Amino acid sequence: MASRREITLIPGDGIGPEVTAAARAIVDASGAAFDWDVQPAGLAAQASGLPALGPAVFESIGRTGLALKGPTGTPFGTPYRIEVGAHRMNPKPEPRVYPSVAIALRKEFDLYMNLRPIRSFPAVPSRYQDVDLLIFRENSEDLYLGRERMVDDDTAEAIKTITRGATTRAAKFACETMVRLGRKKLAVAHKSNVLKLTDGLFLRAAMDVAAQYPQIEARDRVIDALCMELVLAPDRYDCLLLANLYGDIVSDLGAGLVGGLGMAPGANIGEQCAIFEAVHGTAPDIAGRDLANPMAMILSATMLLKHVGELEAAARIERALTSVLERRDRVTGDLGGGPGGGTQAMTQAIIEAM
Ligand code: NAD
Ligand code: IPM
Ligand code: MN
């Protein structure tokens, strides 16, 4: 029998506890043997008197190297600071400050790649039926470093940082993954007509890497036109490489192509750790009402299973999910489910189908 593996589980905020409970129950029923170390983080942790992102979370992920994370809430517009001190994976004593829990985890564990597959499922109502995009989002720099300030009462500025090193690392990951998966077409997104230095460097560095892979056909697309083409004819695209902020925005656009945010899973990957989380946020408008589509989190969990080599368990879950989607009676409303459907009914149906 395969040995048990320890994994960190961050339930998160809003719909996070509902969708991570679904994913956990399904993974447990899949035959993969995991011991879950549950670590609160985010607004819910703060409400119970804990830090939003405390040392216990770093200790846990530093030990397990693997986490399934629910979305964590970040207040819009108002100041919010996540302060992080020394921990096992980053012993720097000077405190670091981040604008959100998700960003702090990505930076502190050096999870430099955010991999977000966007795939249509025939049984799910959506605008397109033949979407199969792989989004490679650089996850460590760009406008995400929190370097923002008020110059005076009426002027604010933010600094966008692009380095050849981070871009090259992300592009190499993308190309290596494409070769492994047999995927051929890569579009590198940029706005180098305006951001000549930052996006210009991103484009040059990414194209330099792609040129070393003769089996990959790489081309550049300016980000605004790319968005239009994705909405018009998403089947013309295969893999996309984007800087951090464009990757964030195009991920949600991609989710919209295949039925909504309930459909898009993701992985934050580094050399030593990986944290798997859906593209969607805490969805406060539907939280606690058994309405959340757990698919994005379940598919994030199957990405995790594949990452650790549990291919059988991942395939079992995907087969069960597909059959439950086809029957439709117990799925959530956004998937076409009726009164018998919901987060919990769908979870139970997937477990029974396995
Ligand atoms: P959101 O993704 O939470 O919600 C946008 C819309 O999509 C809402 O109408 C919501 O009901 C719907 N939706 C999202 N997930 C769904 C699901 N699984 N099933 C059905 N419908 C779903 O975006 P938001 O409202 O802009 O953000 C809410 C909070 O989440 C913010 O604080 C934001 O910072 C945070 N957030 C966190 C993460 C993360 O931790 N990884 C990711 C994105 C957003
Ligand atoms: C995402 C989210 C995060 C991001 C926020 C919550 C910091 O939108 O994971 O897509 O912008 O990366
Ligand atoms: Mn986002």
Image: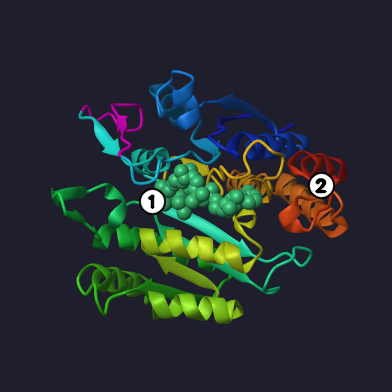
Q: Is residue 33 visible?
A: yes
- Name the disc covering residue 341, or none: 2
The amino acid sitting under disc 2 is: Gly
Instruction: Please tell me how crowded label 1 is: few (under 14), some (14-19), or many (20+) other residues with Cα within 10 Å.
Output: many
Question: Mark 2 or 1, which is nearer the eye?
Answer: 2
Residue at the extreme left of the image, as rendered? 152
283 vs 129: above or below: above
Nearer the observer, 133 or 287: 287
Q: Main secondary structure of the magenta part?
A: loop
Compared to residue 126, the image places residue 23 above or below, namely above
For this view, does 155 lie left or right of residue 229?
Answer: left
- The residue under the point 27% across, 48% down is 145
Q: Amino acid at mark 1?
A: Tyr
**Secondary structure type for disc 1:** loop
**Which residue in the protein does label 1 denote?**
112
Residue at (62% x, 60% y) in the render? 260
**Looking at the image, can residue 141 be seen?**
no
Q: Residues within 10 Å of mark 2 (few under 14, many from 20)?
A: many
Residues 105 and 259: in front is: 259
On the picture, is 30 further left or further right than 153?
Answer: right
Q: Residue at x 19, y 55 (%)?
A: 157
Mark 2 touching mark 1, by CB under 8 A?
A: no
Horizontal and vertical percent for residue 17?
61, 34
Q: Is residue 125 magenta?
A: no
Q: Which residues are magenta?
A: 79-93
Per the image, is 84 magenta? yes
Q: Nearer the viewer, residue 78 or 27?
A: 78
Question: Percent from the top left, x then y, of residue 308?
Answer: 59, 43
Would you place residue 249 above or below residue 63 in this image? below
Q: In which quarter of the view is residue 5 placed?
A: top right
